[in-house]
Image (spheres, rainbow, N blue to C red):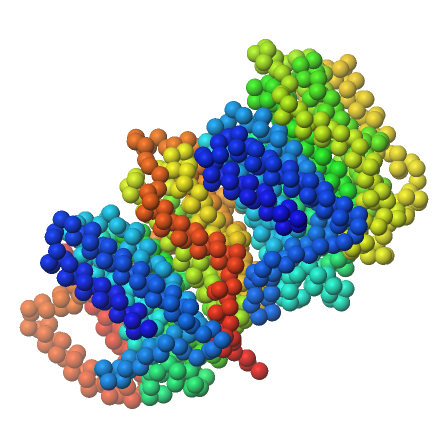
Amino acid sequence: MYLTLIILPLLGSIVSGFFGRKVGVSGAHLITCTSVITTTFLAILAFFEVGFNNIPVTIHVARWIDVESLNVLWNFRFDSLTVSMLLPVLIVSSLVHVYSISYMSHDPHNQRFFSYLSLFTFMMIILVTGNNFLIMFVGWEGVGVCSYLLVNFWFTRIAANQSSLSAILTNRVGDTLLTVGMFAILWSFGNIDYGTVFALAPYYNETIITIIGICLLIGATAKSSQVGLHIWLPQAMEGPTPVSALIHAATMVTAGVYLLMRSSPLIEYSSTVLVLCLWLGAITTVFSSLIGLFQQDIKKVIAYSTMSQLGMMVIAVGLSSYNLALFHLVNHAFYKALLFLGAGSVIHAVADNQDFRRYGGLREFLPLTYSVMLIASLSLVAVPFMTGFYSKDFILESAYGQYYLSSTIVYFVATIGAMFTTLYSAKVLYLTFLANPNGPLVSYKHAHEGDLFLTIPLIILAIFSIFFGYLTKDIFIGLGTGFFTDNSLFIHPSHEIMLDTEFAVPTFFKLLPFVFTVSLSVISVLLSEFLPKLLINFKFSRLGYNIFSFFNQRFYIELFYNKYIVEGVLKLGGQTSKSLDKGTVELIGPYGLEKGLLALSNSIGKLSTGIVTTYALYILIGLIFYITLLYFSYNDNNLLILVIFTLFALLNSNNTSLKETK
Amino acid sequence: MSLLLLLIPLIGVGLVTVEANYGLSLINNIRIKSIALTTSIVNLIVSLVMFILFDFSSKQFQFIEEHYQISYFDIYLGVDGLSIYFVLLTTIIMPIAILSNWNSIKSQNVLSFVVIMLLLESLLLAVFLVLDVLLFYIFFESILPPLFLLIGLFGSSNKVRASFYLFLYTLLGSLFMLLSIIGMSSIMGTTDFDALSKANFNYITQLFLFYGIFIAFAVKTPVIFLNTWLLKAHVESPLSGSIILAGIVLKLSLYGIFRLMLPLLPKASINYTYVIYVIGVITILYASFSTLRTIDIKELIAYSSVSHAAVYLIGAFSNTIQGIEGSIVLGLAHGFVSSGLFICAGGILYDRSSTRLITYYRGMAQVMPIFSVLFFILALGNSGTPLTLNFLGEFMSLYGVFERMPILGVLASTSIVFSAAYTIFMYNRIVFGGSYSLYFVENIGDVTRREFIMLLVFVILTVLFGIYPAPILDGLHYSVSSLIYNVN
């Protein structure tokens, strides 16, 4: 069963990709959807078998790299962390498969698209089930490559090309550091098997664990789009919307957080790494929700919101509350996928326009989409008893509940981030559905709800977004939960803060985020409904204009990267390839040799001038040379070389002077 | 059996000549080519049989043939766990190299092309098979004239300059190696490899011998500032020449390191590793930067070869089993992948459009879907993505380097970013990057069956061994562990 779970999406992908012409469009739909849905049911079964019964499964398939002490096996491991990761990955993936049947129905390359989707799912499964860092890395790179293909699916669009290149290259930077981290693990632990590394971690020097942890953290930064290596995520919104829902909400972007959770037994022993995680997450969450507030593209806003939620997860990792991070990851996957798919439904309805300033009044036309988007947004802003509430609010409380200075500051920073999240969620909902219609008439004439394939995933995800958190809260973060007793997540006893959070945080600070959420959403709706002049006037003032453009241009980080790093590298490349390799080296090397020898032979040839006195001079020089030769070589060899060199130099100067006289 | 490997191509040469002189002129071009192809495939089968019969649990040379009565030199052939893979690489690549120029050679030149190719196969195999240092040198050098002719006869516009560079650089480097080998021979009184490896040169002598040999291999690898010949030769040579150059000739230096430098001059190799590492790391960075700005596809692949070659060069000197085996694996993988990329760029695309500049290509996926898939897998291989053999090689080599010198290892790891940058950029620009290029007036067809088979062989080898490399790694253990040198 467990191997079937892994291999089925790959088979679907191969059939759809390589035999797409044989099976046809509907054949490809049928095969890929069936295989992924079957896998999903198997994963749910595995969740019960492995998770609830606490029976971790390890499967040994084959040897991979077996060199002296470096022993990497094709091993797969199903423990509580893996099966909880499989749940959102596969549920979202199968729903996206179904959704895409309708969404991509007019595309001529359906087989290719479904092949990519299934391949991506396969790589994601490899990522979460691998039993050592290297197999994890296979999935890690694999999802990167698949995301390149998926974002670049409409490859005739230059924007899609640019963003997919940006995605794969930014991820590669993280991959490099992750590779270095693996080298460091191998070097110090002698193996990259999870079991070996985690069992030995307590006995190691903190410095080496910090180094490894920082390398892993940077790898996670690239994959989970934390500040610094985040530029690819918003750009990747160029891809088809189902792809965004799959990759950029539920699966690939969570891989970095997964890595951190998986290495919890390692990074628990380095407080530096934990603090770095805490701050990185906090900065990311406030940074991205600030940018998100000033974007006009509906998908980009959701992308920035994803980034901010990923920041929340990293904060949870930094607080050592890995189960909380995992819980938020799972919850977030559902409501964020719902947001993306809902946005896709909107975009589908209004003729592929993504700028929500040109929406408005869509509530009448898209009632179902409106309701699911509302549910997802409520879940996102952590309205009580929705799915998002149980994890997001708890992360904020935990930050306070650690009772360290930095985590208390992080609490406030993250609360501000959550505040902005509320603001832009309200803004998107308001401008898309509630405001006066602002789009062209044509798009309203054609606006309609999608067919069954488009709506069923929305409804299922909406149900998950409401109830999942409530149902599974006690499994993931309940006080006495036995779910993680197989030690897939390790929380050092002295880092355990759940009790403090539950009982010691003042009610005021527990309620603060909620108060902000409610009051701000009310204020923002009221403001835009009744006092729109105020906002417009602010925007037209000098200060407002500057603030707006600064945030709208995303802190000018892309500008900085393009102007200084990319351009610098390319300029350097031009120098090395053109000036150095095809210039100097060639001039000194073969070309110079050729010309130099030619010149030398010319000047030697010029010696025979045909004048007797010159020959007499040569004879004289020769005679002196031979007489003194003995003396020179007796004393010092260098002198001899010097004399010969001078003769050649004289010859050359003679030649040039001759040329001049001519 | 090892002698058989050398003789079969020569027999092929004979058959081809007979056929050319006595056959019917109309059909004999095809027959000549078929004979050559058959010969090389027979050679492949022989080498595979050798691989099957090979006893991997022994460190001894096997399939030994000694012929003292033939000439002044001792003809002394044999293979061990290292050279068997290089022999296989040669015999796998040669049939494909012959296939690659199947249609693009003019009919009056077919005979000379085929003879050059078979001769090259014989000579290349000889380099890997001989167990005598002097003979190694002789065969190492003897591949130059056929290559010179290959480039000079069938190359593109700037071929004279390219063949001149090839000759100049490699001969210059090899001169020093000859001096070193003569030095060895005069000290020990023998050039027999087995006997030499039992000897122990004194440290200063080792240093001098080391310099001499390293200069030759630095040119052949190549490293920074000595790579001009490679670019020129790759760009100007016909497709088969590029394949042989990238696939096999660049591996000669790697093989030479394992034959001459590590076992014979251990102390010098250990003490001067840092020099090689610095050179290697600078080469990686330099070549990567240069590759980013290259717009000629063949030159781009050649530059990326320089960068990968530097990775396996430093891996080979890591003095760890992982590093050394990784460098061999990367060498083999690079042989497959860069040959495949050359077929993609210099063969399939060039035959159809007569240009090598990336600028003119766009949206090839629209008209050549099968080609795009194969090209993509090879491009992924070149950028070292997991599940390809290149990834394993790169990972293990870089790990070896990291274990030896961590800082330089980290710097060398930047090649992971750069290789993705230039390869994916090239792929993206050619295959995607907008709709089908306006520069092409006519539609062009997808891969033919011949091209498909050639690429498929490389793709399958790369991916299969990337997933299950045990057949390669298991055979290497015995021979590689004897290359490790312990200072204490």
Q: Is residue A226 left or right of residue B321?
A: right
Q: Quadrant of the C terminus of chain A?
A: bottom left
Along the line of sight, the residue nearer the viewer: A288 or A32: A32
Q: For residue B127, what is the image quadrant?
A: bottom left
Q: For residue A444, what is the image quadrant?
A: top right
The percent coordinates of residue A69 (x first, y second) are: 60, 69
Residue drawn 33% across and 86% down?
B190
Residue drawn 27% across and 84% down?
B68
The percent coordinates of residue B223 (x first, y second) are: 41, 62
Residue drawn 75% across and 37% down?
A331
The percent coordinates of residue A351 (x first, y second) are: 56, 19
Along the line of sight, the residue nearer the viewer: A571 or B374: B374
Along the line of sight, the residue nearer the viewer: B358 or A286: B358
Task: Say if A454 sits above or below A569 in the image.
Answer: above
Q: Can residue A395 be seen?
A: yes
Q: Is residue B87 left or right of residue A141?
A: left
The percent coordinates of residue A464 (x first, y second) are: 75, 32
Residue drawn 72% across and 24% down?
A372
